Image: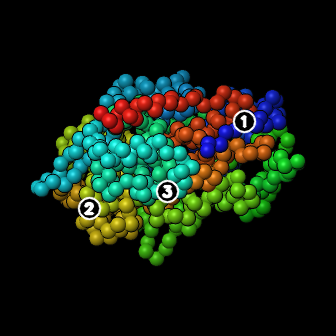
Amino acid sequence: MIRQQQPVLAPGHQSPKKVNAWILGSSIASLASAVHLICDAKVPASQIHILESHDIPGDGIISAGDPVTGYNYRAGCMPTYNDACMERLLNLVPSATNSNVTILEEIKKFNVEMPFQDSPGTHVLIRGDNRLEKMEASKFGIGLKDRMDLLLLMLKSEQTLGRKRIDELFNRRFFNGTFWIVLSTLFNFQPWHSAAEFRRCLRRYSYEFRSLNTKKILDCTRYNQYESIIVPIVRFLQNKGVDFRFRIKVTDIVTISDNDIESVAAINIVQNNSEEIINVCTNDIVIVSIGSVTSGSSSGSNTVPALPPSMEAVNELDENWSLWLDLGTKNPKFGNPYKFCTHVSESRLVTFTVTLNDAAGFFNRFLELTNGRPGSGSLVSLKHSNWMISLCIPHQPFFSNQPNNIDVLWGYGLYPSQEGNFVKMPMTLCNGKEIMAELLWHLDFPMEPILSNSITIPCVMPRMAAALLPRNSTDRPDVTPENVTNLAIVGQFVEIADETTVSLDYSVRGAQLALSRLMGIEGPPMRRRAFHTPFSYFWR
């Protein structure tokens, strides 16, 4: 049964100038909350406080490096598929390059200059008898039994599915088909992930299946999404006067109860090794970003693995998790974070960023192999890779400080614990050069001069796919927990009825939903419901 909620307007919603908003964490959901507080709720920017444990905002997402040491794009396999909620957000914020236009207008202008919308989102390469062959990803080729199984899944209730895995509902043949490969490449699904989340994804995108493999406007930015979206949002907030406080760890949220109605009264923090208390007044609101897909991530280099065999970073949890663990221990209405943060073997991905000197000749070979358009950003999935490698060549330059003679590509492995086909080690234990060698072997490209002219930065991300793990209806908290007057919870791990967490839009929708309930602003747009479409598609 879907949990329905009524608005729980905070005491100070009618007097925004008296509200102090305490935002814990600086994820995209947190940043979106701050933007909407300023633009829609009319809360003065100086009364919006963002507490972040890192030195920079962005929830640990990295977009850094240079052509000498190599670029590192940690957000490379973050879910994209931006939609109406992200569009609304981007239309409120000036771009980083021109303050006279919004981020949305800049993206649309870029897409007019470089039209990528008709480019395939995914290519699938398979190893034939003598060479690599490209499968037609636009034709899913779903068999009769698989169609039946897909329809049955879409018609089941989430209560019936509970914590079932996807591979409990489909046979092995299904996971070798083009349909599954395209969805797993686009959304990072793996067979052991949540059947309920897979169902939501199917129902959400069913009417787009015929165009799902085509690039969308909001997914094609001039530079990487960190520089094109996160940076201008942060700059906008800073210019408005938002109070960013870095290197602060939140250790506890203190609540008081009055006739079973709770309110946040204080926030306990550690700053400069000193414990402090932030008092939360009656009119104030608190927005908590829970969970973090970048928690415990570790980057390596071209010659050093991200995780040496002698150490394990998988047990490291940042405060997004520790705070949620504490809340969940206090009351089950805050969800069960253990279901998401402790199953590292099922949520781990390895990403890599390759910096190439154009003398390597990699790009021309790759475009010839895939018949792709230069810079279209299409994902290429290597079906017979033990690591299940996906690769992307984005529009160049991908970084704003990238020289003309340097190209950058990124990719990730869905099965990083498996032994490589060429490099006989798990991907998690490989340095950048070894990952690049494995990639070149799969593509049938010569090792030299490409290896000598490239720098590959690997990154092990233990919880990258944590939001897709099996769960039941109570494992994720509501955006505004029941009987709490001034608290909202946002991020990829909150419960938003009928919506799928596979898109970045999910986090922004949660922020808009939180503020509509706390401050009475306009809520996120309603989603299209069209259940006849799955039948017409699957039975064609």
Task: Look at 38% across and 63% down and name the residue there.
Answer: 416
Q: Secondary structure under badge 3? A: loop
Task: Residue 381: tell me if it is visible.
Answer: no
Q: CA distance from mark 1 to mark 2?
A: 55 Å
**Res. 154 image quadrant:** top left
Of the image marks 1 and 2, the number of the one nearer the N terminus: 1
Q: Disc 1 marks which amino acid?
A: Gln
Residue highlighted by disc 2? 437
With 435 as the anchor, is 495 left or right in this view? right
Whether pointer 3 and pointer 1 mark residues with C-beta atoms closer than 8 Å, the reply is no
- Can residue 371 be seen from the camera position used here? yes
Give the structural element (helix, strand or loop) at label 2.
Answer: helix
Report the disc number at residue 164: 3
| Residue at 11% across, 55% down | 130
Graded by Cα atoms within 10 Å as few (under 14), some (14 to 19) or many (20 or more), the crowding at tag 2 reads some
Measure the C-alpha gap from mark 3 to mark 2.
Answer: 37 Å
Query: Could you say which is closer to the camera, residue 275 or residue 266?
Result: 266
Residue 69: x percent and y percent?
A: 39, 56
Residue at image x 72%, y 39%?
Answer: 48
Q: Amino acid at mark 3?
A: Lys
Q: Position of residue 81 (x, y in %)?
A: 45, 38
232 to 424, vertically: above or below: above
Furthest residue toward left = 130
Local SS, label 1: loop
Q: Is residue 449 left or right of residue 352?
A: left
